[in-house]
C-alpha cells in the first residue's frame, strides 16, 4: 500500500521534513512493506523554502539585509527559470537579534533576495509570505527591488514603519525596469486587508510587540503609505484580500510589484508535484503543530485534504494538539486525527519529545492503515 506523508512543520519542535521522517520511521517499524513517500509541505510561510528544496529545487545562497539592517545569510530555491523566495527566511521574526522591533523592522532583504533571483535569470518568482518581523507595508520590499521612497525633502525615509509617516514621494522607474518580463506570484494563506480592524497592524502588530497605542500608530502609517501608493499607481488596493499579509508586504506585492495572489498551500503543492504523487495512493497523512480553527481557514492540512479529495484518497492528520472536535474534523474531510497530547499532555514536554512521540504515533497509525484503506 502507498502512503503519502505530507505534513507541515510542528512550529517550535520540528520542521516539516523532521515530522515526515519521524512518522515514516514509526510506520515502517510496524509495516516495513508500506511504500511511504515523504512530501514536506507549507502554506507560504516559514517552511516554504524547505518544501521547495525537498521537491528538487536547488538552494542559491544570498546575503541580504535582515529586518534590522544587519546582514543575514539566506537563499532562494531555483528550478530552471523559476525561483521560490521565503520572506520569513530573510525578513522574519527569527532574524531579530534583540527581540521585537515593530516600528523598525524592514522587508528590504526580501526585495534584495527577489532581485538576486531575477539577476540570475529567473523569470517566475513565487514569494511566500508569513512570519514577518515588520509592519512596513512592504516599503522595504519596494526599495530592495530598486524603488525609492522619499520624504518631502527628497531624502530616503527611514526603514521600517517609522519611516512611513514621512513618505511623500514614490519613484518606481528602477523597480519597473527590474521586474520587466518577470511573473511574480504572492503565496499567502491570509485574507486580511492592509488597514482597519482586521488589517496588518490590528491583527498581527501585537504579535510583533506593538502596544495598543503602537497598533494605532502603525495603522495610521500604513494608511499614509497606501495613500501615496494609490496616488502614484492610480489604484487603491489597501482593502484587497491578502494586502495585510506579512505586515503589509502583501499590499506592496499586489499594488506596486503587480503580483498575482494564490493560496499559499496550493502554490506549494503545485511546486512539489503533489497531485502526481498522490494519484493512485491509498492514504495521505498530513498535519501541523496545532490543528484548530485557524487550520480551517486554509492552512496546509486543509489544502492537502482538498487536493487529495479530488483524487479520491482519504486523509488522516497528526498534530501536536487539536481544539477541533470529531464533527469538526470530519467536516474538514479528515478521516481520523492523532494528537501528541494524547500521549504527552504537558505541552512543554510534548514539544521537547515531538520526534519520539511522532515515531510512536506512526506505529499506531501503521496498525490502522489496513482498516482506513478498507473503509474507502
Image: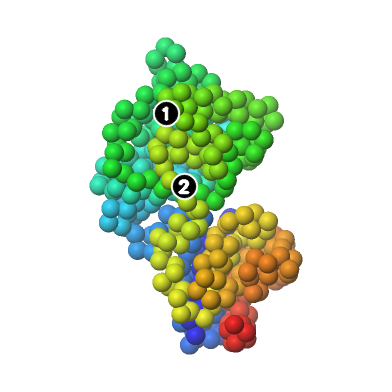
Location of residue 274 with respect to 100 vertically, above or below: below
Q: Which mark is residue 353?
A: none
Q: Position of residue 151 (x, y in %)?
A: 44, 17
350 left or right, relative to 60: right
Q: Which mark is residue 233?
A: 1
Depth check, front residue: 338 or 340: 338
Q: Secondary structure at mark 1?
A: helix
The image quarter in which residue 272 lies: bottom left
Pointer 1 and pointer 2: residues touching (CB < 8 Å)? Answer: no
Res 37 seen here: no
What's the image's color scheme?
A: rainbow
Q: How far apart in space, not on screen, are marks 1 and 2 (Cα)?
A: 18 Å
Residue 148 appears in the rendering: yes
Residue 239 position by quadrant: top right
Q: Earlier in the sequence, mark 1 or mark 2?
A: 1
157 over 238 or under it: above or below: above
Q: Residue at x 56, y 27 (%)?
A: 223
Q: Residues within 10 Å of mark 1 (few under 14, many from 20)?
A: few
Q: Which residue is tagged 2?
A: 261
Q: Dot 2 surroundings within 10 Å: few (below 14), some, or many (20 or more)?
A: many
Residue 375 placed where, x, y %? 62, 84
**Residue at coordinates 55% horizontally, 28% vertically from top-left?**
222
Q: Could you tell me which secondary element the residue under label 2 belongs to?
A: strand
Amino acid at each position: 500500500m502507498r502512503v503519502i506523508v505530507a505534513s507541515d512543520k510542528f512550529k517550535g519542535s520540528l520542521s516539516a521534513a523532521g515530522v515526515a521522517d519521524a512518522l515514516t520511521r514509526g510506520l515502517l517499524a510496524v509495516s516495513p512493506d508500506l511504500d511511504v513517500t515523504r512530501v514536506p509541505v507549507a502554506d507560504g510561510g516559514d517552511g516554504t523554502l524547505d518544501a521547495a528544496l525537498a521537491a528538487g529545487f536547488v538552494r542559491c545562497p544570498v546575503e541580504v539585509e535582515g529586518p534590522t539592517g544587519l546582514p543575514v545569510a539566506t537563499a532562494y530555491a531555483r528550478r530552471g527559470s523559476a525561483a521560490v523566495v521565503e520572506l520569513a527566511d530573510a525578513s522574519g521574526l527569527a532574524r531579530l537579534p534583540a527581540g521585537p522591533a515593530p516600528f523598525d523592522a524592514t522587508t528590504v532583504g526580501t526585495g534584495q533576495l527577489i532581485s538576486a533571483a531575477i539577476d540570475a535569470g529567473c523569470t517566475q518568482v513565487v514569494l511566500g509570505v508569513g512570519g514577518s518581523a515588520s509592519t512596513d507595508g512592504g516599503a522595504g520590499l519596494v526599495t530592495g527591488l530598486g524603488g525609492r521612497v522619499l520624504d518631502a525633502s527628497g531624502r530616503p525615509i527611514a526603514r521600517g514603519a517609522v519611516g512611513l509617516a514621512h513618505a511623500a514621494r514614490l519613484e518606481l522607474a528602477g523597480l519597473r525596469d527590474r521586474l520587466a518580463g518577470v511573473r511574480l506570484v504572492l503565496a499567502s494563506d491570509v485574507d486580511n486587508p492592509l488597514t482597519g480592524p482586521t488589517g496588518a497592524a490590528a491583527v498581527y502588530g501585537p504579535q510583533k510587540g506593538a502596544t495598543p497605542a503602537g497598533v494605532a500608530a502603525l495603522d495610521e502609517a500604513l494608511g499614509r503609505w497606501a495613500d501615496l501608493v494609490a496616488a502614484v499607481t492610480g489604484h487603491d488596493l489597501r482593502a484587497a484580500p491578502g494586502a495585510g499579509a506579512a505586515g503589509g508586504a502583501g499590499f506592496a506585492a499586489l499594488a506596486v510589484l503587480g503580483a498575482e495572489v494564490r493560496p499559499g498551500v496550493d502554490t506549494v503543492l503545485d511546486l512539489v508535484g503533489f497531485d502526481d504523487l498522490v494519484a493512485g495512493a491509498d492514504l495521505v497523512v498530513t498535519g501541523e503543530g496545532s490543528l484548530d480553527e485557524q487550520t480551517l481557514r486554509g492552512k496546509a492540512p486543509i489544502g492537502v485534504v482538498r487536493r487529495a479529495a479530488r483524487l479520491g484518497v482519504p486523509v488522516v492528520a497528526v498534530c501536536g494538539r487539536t481544539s477541533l472536535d470529531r464533527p469538526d474534523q470530519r467536516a474538514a474531510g479528515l478521516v481520523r486525527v492523532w494528537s501528541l497530547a494524547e500521549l504527552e499532555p504537558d505541552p512543554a514536554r510534548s514539544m521537547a519529545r515531538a520526534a519520539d512521540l511522532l515515531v510512536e504515533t506512526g506505529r499506531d497509525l501503521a496498525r490502522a492503515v489496513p482498516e482506513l484503506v478498507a473503509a474507502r
